[in-house]
Image: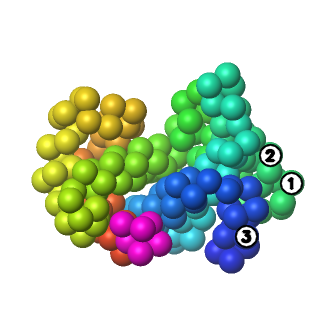
């Protein structure tokens, strides 16, 4: 897993700035989760997070949501980058792909993907728009406000508990990971 190669692929396939920043955020959360759950696979988890939405500028989500993930995997295979474990997790993070969650990494990316957008949405309602201003309590409180960031899959985020991590602990881990790359995220 070479991050320089992964970054080259990210910028080759994604052009939309917010998707690139989202990819960085998911990479950071996946790296933190790997350190906690499978430290020997830290780079694999991180690169999976970085490349999980590689096809986001290419796939027509509205008409073909089932292609999201599978298209990214086809591109990664063509580029000769990744592993079968990575490919499975990339597909499993999208329920519409038909690929079921089977591993810890699958579950981690399924939960990490929406929490990064959720934390970003919370950050953007703060007057200073700085992630350093966000507190774990704000994240857990906003989870109960169904109208706030309504598109964020709360069930996916809460599914982290199936890995023995409470939601508040996950919120804290994710917030810390994203804070570490706040400059890259523009937050």
From the top left corner, tell me how far across and down residue 36 is, in percent. Answer: 36, 66
Cβ atoms under marks 2 and 1 closer than 8 Å: yes
Q: From what the image shows, is residue 105 above or below residue 97?
A: below
Residue under numbered circle 3:
8
Q: Which one is in front in this view, the residue at disc 3 or the one at disc 1?
A: 3
Q: Residue at x 47, y 43 (%)?
A: 110
CA gap between label 2 and label 3 equals 17 Å
What color scheme is it?
A: rainbow
Horizontal relation, residue 159 to residue 89: left or right: left
Q: Does residue 186 show up magenta in the picture?
A: yes
Horizontal relation, residue 73 to residue 185: left or right: right
From the top left corner, tell me how far across and down residue 173 is, in percent. Answer: 29, 63
Query: Which part of the image, by quadrant, shows the N terminus?
Result: bottom right
CA gap between label 2 and label 1 equals 6 Å
CA gap between label 3 and label 1 equals 14 Å
The label shown at residue 78 is 1
Q: Earlier in the sequence, mark 2 or mark 3?
A: 3
The answer to whether residue 107 is seen in the rendering is: no
From the top left corner, tell me how far across and down residue 187 is, in percent. Answer: 36, 66
Q: Does residue 183 show up magenta in the picture?
A: yes
Q: Which one is in front in this view, the residue at disc 2 or the one at disc 3?
A: 3
Q: Which residues are magenta?
A: 181-187
Residue under numbered circle 2:
74
Q: Of all residues shown, which one is farthest toward the front?
A: 127
Horizontal relation, residue 179 to residue 70: left or right: left
Q: Residue at x 67, y 70 (%)?
A: 7
The label shown at residue 91 is none
From the top left corner, tell me how far across and down residue 77 is, in percent. Answer: 82, 53
Q: Residue at x 42, y 61 (%)?
A: 29
């Amino acid at each position: 897993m070479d991050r320089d190669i992964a970054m080259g692929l990210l910028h080759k396939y994604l052009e939309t700035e917010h998707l690139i920043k989202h990819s960085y955020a998911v990479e950071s959360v996946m790296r933190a989760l790997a350190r906690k759950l499978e430290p020997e696979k830290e780079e694999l988890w991180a690169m999976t997070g970085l490349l999980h939405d590689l096809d986001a500028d290419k796939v027509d989500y509205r008409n073909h949501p089932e292609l999201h993930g599978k298209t990214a995997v086809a591109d990664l295979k063509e580029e000769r980058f990744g592993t079968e474990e990575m490919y499975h997790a990339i597909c499993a993070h999208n329920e519409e792909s038909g690929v079921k969650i089977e591993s810890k990494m699958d579950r981690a990316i399924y939960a990490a993907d929406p929490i990064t957008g959720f934390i970003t949405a919370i950050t953007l309602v703060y007057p200073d728009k700085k992630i350093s201003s966000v507190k774990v309590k704000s994240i857990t409180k906003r989870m109960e406000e169904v109208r706030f960031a309504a598109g964020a899959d709360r069930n996916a985020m809460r599914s982290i508990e199936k890995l023995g991590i409470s939601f508040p602990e996950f919120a804290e881990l994710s917030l810390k990971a994203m804070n570490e790359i706040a400059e890259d995220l523009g937050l």
